[in-house]
Image (spheres, rainbow, N blue to C red):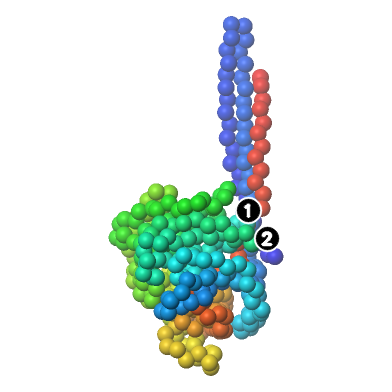
Amino acid sequence: TTTTTTTTTTSTSTTTTTTTSATTATTTTSTTATQTTTLRTTCLERIYFSRDTVRLSSFTSTPETHVNVVDFSCAAGNLTLGNITDLVRFMPRRDAAGAIGIDANGNLVVAGGDGNIGGNASAPGRVHTVDATTLAVDTADTPNGRALQLALAPDGNTAWAAGSSGPLYRVSLSPVLASAAIEVPVSGDDTAVTQVAFTDAVDAFYINGPDTGNGRFGSLSLSMSSAVTTFALTHPAARTMTFDPFTGLLLLAGNSWLAQVDPLSPSTVVASLDLSAVAGINANLTAPGVQLDQVSCDRTGKCFVSENTYGMMVLVDYSATGLVDAASTTVDARWLADNLAGASIDCPLEVITTTTTTATTAT
């Protein structure tokens, strides 16, 4: 796997002087902490995705959320999906499987439902973690049933979850998953959110909008206890988003649209692409209304988007120019699963080594 490695070294020094009637002694203690992180520039060719056993429009029984994985290839812009493996199943308490993230250890983080959609706002939503090796599942409740979209903080220790336009929930992932999420109030130009994304350890952005897209997008001043929004623009693609290291742009997905937004100028849409024609790629798909959901990038100029109406996985290859609306950009789509919800390509941030050295010198 091709990697880009970043090493951060932090040094601290403490000097203590002790004086007695006969002598003066000086003790110096130095601590050096080094953390090396490796970002995969070539991701693994597999997609994790979530799906439900019942549709939201026909919610007549208790649903079961499935978390699956599928291998793929995308040579020459053509998407080929392999066999699907069913990893785990769990009851989300409400009706909707949600987004999937991958933490620094390669484990899955899965949003598990929004009671506001199912008509039972008092039922808590859930955020699940799935161990990549043992497939063991841990669960944290989110108050008021809100957990459809999520984003992992750059340090990999925190997940931020939201439902259908409401408050944010902070979920501690390290050293173990917290049993319950902490609600973080939202204020500013928007007082509710549906999605957040990070471009680095400092800068965050938000979307506030319906599941059909056409939401509000802007920058987010985020701490562990507050979230302050600054509105920038409205766009049909404003439903979900992710940061794309290949272009340095935010990639929004919603309704039938993709949009690239400059994080240094949040009111600037760099490029946008209407994907309403992808249903025609598969002759057996006849229902109206492409509905894009979770988007993830492979860091080489390709993005993968789950689509809710038809259950498609959509591949957009913009590697030639970095722009989704360029003439050279190619689009392909394949049916993946009924009731498809979130999906993410296997591209975690990996922490390789953490070393702390302490030296004490006495004089």
> What is the spatial separation of the Cα atoms under label 2 and label 1, in whole angstroms?
17 Å
Residue at 41% across, 79% down: 57
Instruction: Indicate which disc residue 351 carries.
Output: 1
Amino acid identity at mark 2: Thr
Q: The N terminus lies in which quarter of the figure?
A: bottom right
Q: At numbered mark 2, what does the secondary structure look like: helix, strand or loop?
A: loop
Amino acid found under the numbered disc labelled 1: Val
Would you say 192 lies left or right of 37 here?
left
Residue found farthest to the left: 189
Please name which of the two marks, 2 or 1, marks the residue nearer to the observer: 2
Along the line of sight, the residue nearer the viewer: 205 or 127: 127
Instruction: Identify the image quadrant of residue 189.
Output: bottom left
Q: Is residue 247 visible?
A: no
Q: Going 45% across and 89% down the picture, which residue do you hit?
A: 287
Q: Nearer the viewer, residue 253 or 308?
A: 308
Q: Position of residue 113 (x, y in %)?
A: 45, 66
Point out which mark residue 232 bears: none
Left or right of 153? Residue 32 is right
Quadrant the C terminus occupies: top right
Q: How many marks?
A: 2
Instruction: Report the residue marked by disc 2.
Output: 133
**Vertical order, 258 against 217 (above or below):** below
Alpha-carbon neighbours of circle 1 within 10 Å: few (<14), some, or many (≥20)? some
